[in-house]
Image (tube, rainbow, N blue to C red):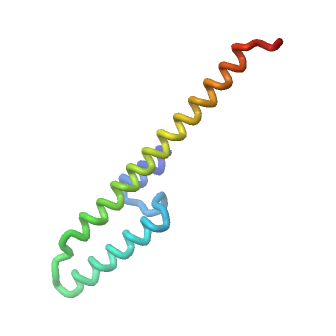
Amino acid sequence: MGKKLDAIRNRELWPLTGSEQARVAALAARAGVKLGRGKSAGSLGGRIDAVFADAERRVLAEEKAEEKEAQAKADAKAARKAKGWW
C-alpha cells in the first residue's frame, strides 16, 4: 500500500479508481479550456486536489482494514496453537 500512497501524494493517476480518474480528467479538461480562453481556472485546481485527498483517505482506510484483518488472522492462529495438538 505504501507505493499507492506515495503515488497519490505525487499526483499520479494509476492508483486512482476509474471514477476518480474520470473526475480528474474532466476537471483538467475544463481548466484547460478556461485557460485557453484566457480566463482563470479558478477553483478547479482545488477540486483536483480534493479528489487526490479523497483518494488518499480511501487508501489509508483500505490499509487500516487490511492490517485489522491480518491481526484477526494472527489472533485466530495463536488461539488454535494455544489449544494444543490433542
Quarter holding the C terminus is top right
Is 7 rendered above or below residue 29?
above
Give the total of numbered labels.
0
Tell me: 76 left or right of 30: right
Question: Which residue appears farthest toward the right when viewing the image?
Answer: 86
Percent position of residue 17, x then y: 48, 62
Which is more toward the observer, 84 or 3? Answer: 84
Tell me: 44 left or right of 16: left
Is 11 rendered above or below residue 1?
below
Tell me: 82 left or right of 19: right
Percent position of residue 41, x then y: 20, 75
Percent position of residue 1, x then y: 50, 45
Residue shown at 24%/64% (left/top)? Answer: 46
Name the quadrant containing residue 52.
Answer: bottom left
Is 26 rendered above or below residue 2?
below
Residue shown at 16%/82% (left/top)? Answer: 39
Percent position of residue 67, x then y: 52, 35
Which is more toward the observer, 33 or 74? Answer: 74
Which is more toward the observer, 50 or 5? Answer: 50
Residue shown at 66%/20% (left/top)? Answer: 78
Residue shown at 68%/24% (left/top)? Answer: 77
Question: Which residue appears farthest toward the bottom when viewing the image?
Answer: 37
